[in-house]
Image (cartoon, rainbow, N blue to C red):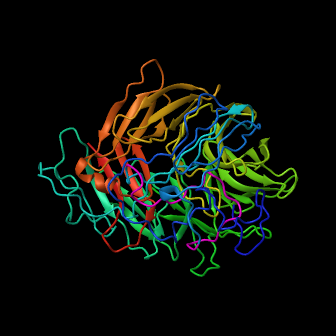
Amino acid sequence: MTQPPGQPPTGGGFGAPQDPQSPQGGFGPPQDPRQAVPPPPAQPPVPPQPGYGPPQQSGPYAQAPQQSGPYAQPPQPGPYGQPGYGYPQQSGPYARPQPGYGYPQQPHQFPGAPTPPPGGGSKNPFKGRPALAVGAAIAVLLVIGGTVYAVSGDGDGGKKPTAGGSPKATPSTGASAPVNPGDGSGDGGADPENLNEGRKAGESKVLWYKEAPDAPGSGADAPGMWITAKSAVKAAYKQVFAYNVADGAPSWDPISFPQKICAVTPRKTADDKIVVAYMSGISSNAKCNRLQEIDLGTGKKGWSAEVADGALFDSTLSLELTVTGKTLMVGRSQSGTAYDVGTGKKLWDKQRYGAACFPSAFAGGTKLISVASCGAGGPNEHDEVQELDPATGKARWTRPIPKGWTVSRAFSVDPVVLYLTNDDKKSAAISTLKNDGTPRSDVHSKESFAPQCGWAVLERDLQGCTGVVADADTLYLPTEAKTGPNEIVVVNLDTGKEKWRVKSPGDESMLPLKSDGTRLIAYVQPSYSAGGQVVSLPTTGGSHTVTGLLRNPSGAAPVEGGFYAKAIDYVAGRFYVSSTRLSGGNQSKEKLMLAYGK
């Protein structure tokens, strides 16, 4: 949720600002990666240190063992007065970020907000987007409809945001060099570095790659990635590029904007349209309020619009864009406006309702979900979740969330799977709802789950997570790997209980990517010496054997894993990875996108 700088908080859940000098134990406000000083370059892997991660438990209310590591705090009372777990003060790679960089400290934060960890503190610095950070084991919690076990995760090691530099040369096998324009234009010029050199038997190849456009020294956002039948489309700083999926040649001329792109629709429409938002200027008072529709098939601009500010404190300093069917939802800090995504015609507004309920975040897809903050500062302060009719904006159902709990992420909108956080309890939980908004189940697990999530600095980024997938009856969650490979835990959404799990076939963590109803597609992250993998496993029947689809070339592993923040997708037998954050540094030319195939 966004508040104008220097204004008093008004939306639900906004209390007094946190004292930036008070210890937060890793749960403090994240630094804005658009302005923060990049972390130092990654160091060689070091053995995991004691004291991180959840203590072993014999039961949901078990006393936390005494520790000698950074979590050596006396146990605090749990949610029901039972012995619980202290809220640890931290040092090292998961410490609370210090004030002084980027945006000011925000008044409302949650344990799920990731913090940018410095390099060198984890086994693998090639884990792109920061993991959902909760940072401590927590006792059982009562949330929406029953008992849930909290989830936790410490974030992952960061690497300097430069996906560039040439991997070490290895003996050539004569593999063809991928197409690289060098300047983002896609002209297929000479290849300055052959990422397929030394490609081993059974490995896929880099079909083509693109270098990033110039960006300011402070860095720039490169949000979104959209794959159509013909093109891979990517936004970067002030431009949108399109490349032929087979050979990387330009599909159409880059689209340029007068100011930087500040928001995009994360998903395209059924007829391959997207909407991007860009800034009104470069001053500190500039708004993220200019909309532009783009046809991904032709590269032509469609309708454009300017989003007006709402009432007092309801600004367009940042926007949240999402598409459901033919409806584009544009979220401000305390309200939203719906447009016809094909024509730009305004359809309806979602404004304050009920007992001071301010719609503060939206999530789209096959359903449109709204999250509102209600009764700020009062005895009945709470969040509410609604499903909205995309055509009219009317609420189909409303589900109040218990006081103290914040809807921080929507892991899925169909079915509705919510990631909830509680500042006071330093806790987190996963709850699911039925199609009518009534409670369905709460996830029962003592695992630390670690999907990769983006940066929610000024607003709730409800759909900013990669590595968590849900279908009609099942939720797929990646565990946090303390050492070695992780697992994917498969949860029954009707009961909240684990059905089965599968271990990563590689040495690194495996993330769920998508489900087609009969199989789960997952991505195994690269290591220092091995490329990533795309694998599948059946979701029905009794066998859940992992089958390899692509094994990316080991010679390109440093580039594949070097993105500080990334988007990934697997479409029609090709794997795509692109940067979502450009460093703007001049140490080496950084990569914007790579495409892999056989």
Q: Horizontal and vertical percent for residue 366?
A: 61, 42
518 displayed left or right of 21: left
Q: How many marks?
A: 0
Magenta stretch containing residue 533, yes or no?
A: no
Q: Residue at x 62, y 48 (%)?
A: 73
Bounds of the magenta span? 100-123
- State yes or no: residue 110 in magenta: yes
Q: Which residue does the image show at 69% across and 67% down from the upper left?
A: 19
- Give me the residue at 52% from left, 47% from top: 68
Q: Position of residue 47 (x, y in %)?
A: 37, 48
Name of the residue lying farthest toward the bottom? 283
- In percent of width and height, residue 391 lies at 72, 48
Indicate the position of residue 94 as horizontal and vertical percent values.
Answer: 51, 56
> Is residue 29 or residue 430 the one in the foreground?
29
Question: What residue occupies the far top of the structure in this picture?
Answer: 542
Res. 524 image quadrant: top left
**Residue 598 occupies which quadrant of the picture?**
top left
